[in-house]
Image (tube, rainbow, N blue to C red):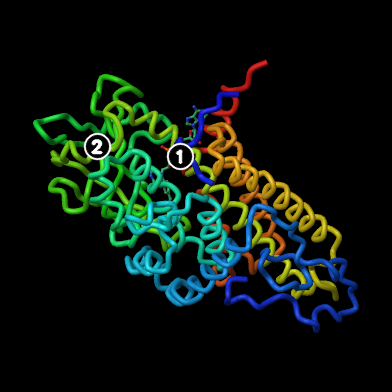
Amino acid sequence: MTRIRCNGRKRSALPSQPGLPDSRVRSQRYTDPFANVRIGPPYSAAGPYDLDMRRTIFTEDHELFRQSVRTFIEREVTPNFERWDRDGIVDRELFTSAGAAGFLAMDAPEAFGGGGVEDFRYNAIISEEFAYSGAAPAGIGITLHNDVCLPYFLSLTTHEQKQRWLPGICSGELITAIAMTEPGIGSDLASMSTSALRDGDDYVVNGAKTFITNGINADLVIVALKTDPKERHKGMSLLVIERGTPGFERGRNLEKVGLHAQDTAELFFTDARVPVANLLGGEGMGFLHLVENLPQERLSIAVGAVAAARQALRWTLEYTHERTAFGQPVAAFQNSRFVLAECATEIEIAEVFLDRCIEALNANELTVEEAAMAKWWTTELQKRVVDSCVQLHGGYGYMLEYPIARAYLDTRIQTIYGGTTEIMKEIIGRSLRP
Ligand SMILES: Cc1cc2nc3c(=O)[nH]c(=O)nc-3n(C[C@H](O)[C@H](O)[C@H](O)COP(=O)(O)OP(=O)(O)OC[C@H]3O[C@@H](n4cnc5c(N)ncnc54)[C@H](O)[C@@H]3O)c2cc1C
């Protein structure tokens, strides 16, 4: 297997749902087969349904961090989530309050306002807590900023660029995005047509990008483009294009099937003059820089996928123990138990692999192929689990007032963005040799 390492840096119930089933439910004549086991997040007080295996990757410091993130989400996210969901975008203040609380750029140097700790476990905790809170779409902008964009700003910037951009990225005053996809190309990145032609100390940029996460809120967009349009991979470079650059316009905030609180936009560049000083990494090295950084993006999506699947299972356990049919809880039917058992088993297995990948990333050992495995398998798992959970909710699973219905809408994109399942299998398949 080719061992291309990731980004080359060294690292050391939705509240509206009722809580766990109460004693009234457990005292029904049905004997609960899960009565003595627990299913719930690792930090939860031992409830009756917590089946989680103990995760060995987290220390006490991580658990304290988890508690702080959870409190932050309860105070800053949950009360605003419905409004953001309606508006199709989170307030910019979410980023500055996350920055002030220490939840942005944990791995940026302290000198620039970062946390100074290179440890992806902290990133994973933020993503997991957003999923467990039921407000996952509101967290996507932050995880994109931390997990996906920041590594480019840490590993590819000059000292001058670091001084210019990192303080704002750490404080949340500069929101980031990355723009690779164009209306005509997504998977086939080397065919992109947005161009940046050198003119004195500037590049003149022309083209369009689409489906860009944080596209409306972003102040700094890492744009993948062609500095040599005659070439494919070798012609690609990364340029940071800043809010307010003449010739840089945003299109609509796109209407999506799910992830409604997340802004996703089109970007247009018409003779936009961008200083050569905004080049990220080497000219013509853009594709290589993407290859080095995409594994962390894919692992980040995998973390969200496993956490979302776990939360879907948790909502469904609650629901099926409360809902009765034919005089017994829905959870008492053997089919329900089998479906729930299959979901619980696959989530546990996925999480073990995921934790191993997080350790590998921290040790700078995660390969492109391993990240691809994590991405496709966990997101396909999330789709299966959420679909099964909707089925166990019956008609209520189709009602948007139930979090499982929203989860169903939010899940569908997971196997598409960050590289489709098919492209992940291509990456893995090509590396397999006898
Ligand atoms: C909500 C959302 C957020 C997004 N955020 C961002 C972002 O922040 N930045 C960004 O740059 N992009 C973003 N994207 C774009 C996303 O990454 C692309 O949609 C994705 O990579 C697929 O590209 P495409 O849509 O052009 O599909 P295509 O590449 O046209 O693929 C269409 C189908 O063909 C299949 N296919 C393509 N090539 C092959 C092949 N070689 N073998 C087998 N099958 C193949 C694909 O798997 C897919 O099923 C986002 C998309 C969405 C919907």
Q: Who is closer to the viewer here, 128 or 324?
A: 128
Position of 112 relative to 433 (above/below) = below
Which residue is under mark 1?
9
Measured as percent of width and height from the top left, residue 59 is found at: 63, 59
Q: Who is closer to the viewer here, 123 or 429?
A: 123
Q: Circle 1 sits in a helix, a strand or a loop, which is it?
A: loop
Q: Is residue 351 visible?
A: yes
Which residue is under mark 2?
279
Measured as percent of width and height from the top left, residue 116 is found at: 43, 54
Image quarter for residue 48? bottom right
Q: Circle 2 sits in a helix, a strand or a loop, which is it?
A: strand
Question: Foreground mark, 2 or 1?
Answer: 1
Position of 270 relative to 259 (above/below) = above
Position of 92 relative to 301 (above/below) = below
> What's the residue at 33%, 28% (across, down)?
285
> What's the residue at 69%, 61% (across, down)?
313
